[in-house]
Image: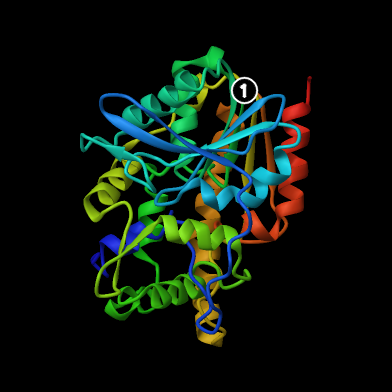
């Protein structure tokens, strides 16, 4: 079980794994519309989902702790016009690695392995949350293999100190206790309240949840990736400083706000979350926007109309589909 005060706090800041309403049973997952496959080298085996489609390739990169199942609805809507592929980062989902290496250079090499193995010469890259690190570095190293970048609530440099300040101000009473890890049901309940309280439970959330936990014999759960892999990946992400000046392809940066949805409807809770948004997140977001405007050569910045860092994927779905489609087709 992960440390309540330190590790879990960090784990769930850029984790978009879901949780369920305590009175709602797990839904029956809809028919699969993707092909699951694996690519591998001597060091790593990567799980990927391919929704098919024709035209430009769009590769979806998850936030920390997640799997591409979370993109199910978005991928289905885009796949009629694009070949949409998502993959699980090493030691996430069904992906495996033989070495405990999680630095950004290694993660970028995994992305290259995916493209090489699937014989994709050039792609559009979408990175959610810390996935913004991988797409920034990949295009810096392999500019001829990237058409465009999409920073999907990923326009934050995790190394600039703002992230650490945000972590230190999350209200600890809203973090999970030991009972949250005793069953899959309890885990869903906590996640829904803390991260997705403004979203109805759905198949994409359930599929991502089931791919991000392991149920033990006693019914308790442990998360995938394991604690060591998660902590190492997160620490490496916080050590990576982005160099936007090396990005020369068109970029779309999508922000959402507020960052959090209040964990309950108590007036004091709402007041506390408003304070975090106004005094910590908003200045951090604004500083990152200014830097991106100054450093990215060809950038479009948009704000999703609804949802938080996690829930905007669902609550701003129509907006996101239209924005991505318009951006990818611009200039073609």
Give the residue at x 41% y 48%.
64
Res 80 quadrant in image: top right
Q: Regarding mark 1 in the picture, which secondary structure is present there?
A: loop
Res 167 quadrant in image: bottom left
In the picture, measured across the screen, residue 320 lies left or right of residue 217, that is right
Return the residue nearer the eye: 217 or 136: 217
In the picture, measured across the screen, residue 54 lies left or right of residue 187, that is right
Give the residue at x 25% y 45%.
232
What x and y, as percent, mark residue 69? 53, 50
What x and y, as percent, mark residue 164? 35, 54
Position of residue 191 relative to residue 59, above or below, is: below
What x and y, as percent, mark residue 95? 36, 41
Label 1 Cα neighbours within 10 Å, binned few <14 / some 14-19 / many ≥20: some
Position of residue 36 relative to residue 317, above or below, is: above
- Colour convention: rainbow
Return the residue nearer the eye: 177 or 67: 67
Quarter holding the C terminus is top right
What x and y, as percent, mark residue 209? 46, 61
Quarter holding the N terminus is bottom left
Res 141 quadrant in image: top left
Give the residue at x 63% y 71%.
200
Give the residue at x 45% y 26%.
114
Position of residue 5 relative to residue 61, above or below, is: below
In the picture, measured across the screen, residue 259 lies left or right of residue 147, that is left
**Count of labels shown?**
1
The residue beneath circle 1 is 297
Position of residue 205 relative to residue 157, above or below, is: below
Residue at the far front in the pictured view: 31
């Amino acid at each position: 079980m992960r440390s309540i005060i330190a590790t879990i706090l960090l784990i769930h800041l850029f984790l978009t794994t879901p949780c369920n309403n305590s009175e709602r049973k797990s839904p029956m997952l809809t028919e699969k519309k993707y092909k699951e496959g694996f690519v591998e080298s001597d060091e790593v085996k990567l799980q990927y989902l391919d929704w098919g489609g024709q035209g430009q390739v769009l590769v979806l990169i998850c936030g920390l702790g997640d799997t591409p199942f979370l993109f199910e609805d978005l991928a289905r809507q885009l796949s009629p016009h694009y070949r949409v592929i998502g993959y699980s980062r090493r030691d996430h989902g069904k992906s495996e690695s033989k070495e405990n290496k999680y630095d950004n250079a290694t993660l970028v090499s995994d992305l290259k392995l995916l493209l090489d193995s699937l014989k994709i010469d050039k792609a559009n890259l979408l990175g959610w949350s810390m996935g913004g690190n991988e797409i920034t570095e990949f295009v810096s190293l392999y500019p001829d293999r990237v058409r465009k970048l999409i920073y999907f609530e990923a326009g934050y440099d995790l190394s600039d100190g703002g992230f650490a300040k945000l972590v230190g101000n999350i209200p600890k009473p809203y973090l999970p206790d030991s009972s949250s890890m005793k069953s899959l049901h309890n885990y869903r309940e906590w996640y829904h309240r803390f991260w997705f309280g403004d979203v109805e439970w759905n198949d994409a959330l359930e599929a991502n949840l089931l791919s991000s936990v392991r149920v033990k014999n006693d019914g308790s759960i442990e998360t995938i990736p394991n604690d060591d892999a998660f902590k190492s990946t997160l620490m490496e992400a916080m050590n990576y400083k982005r160099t936007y000046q090396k990005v020369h392809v068109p970029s779309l940066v999508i922000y959402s706000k507020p960052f959090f949805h209040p964990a309950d409807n108590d007036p004091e809770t709402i007041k506390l979350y408003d304070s975090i948004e106004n005094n910590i997140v908003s200045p951090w977001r604004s500083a990152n926007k200014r830097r991106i405007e100054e450093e990215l050569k060809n950038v479009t910045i948009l704000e999703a109309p609804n949802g938080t860092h996690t829930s905007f994927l669902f609550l701003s779905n129509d907006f996101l589909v239209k924005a991505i489609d318009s951006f990818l087709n611009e200039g073609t």
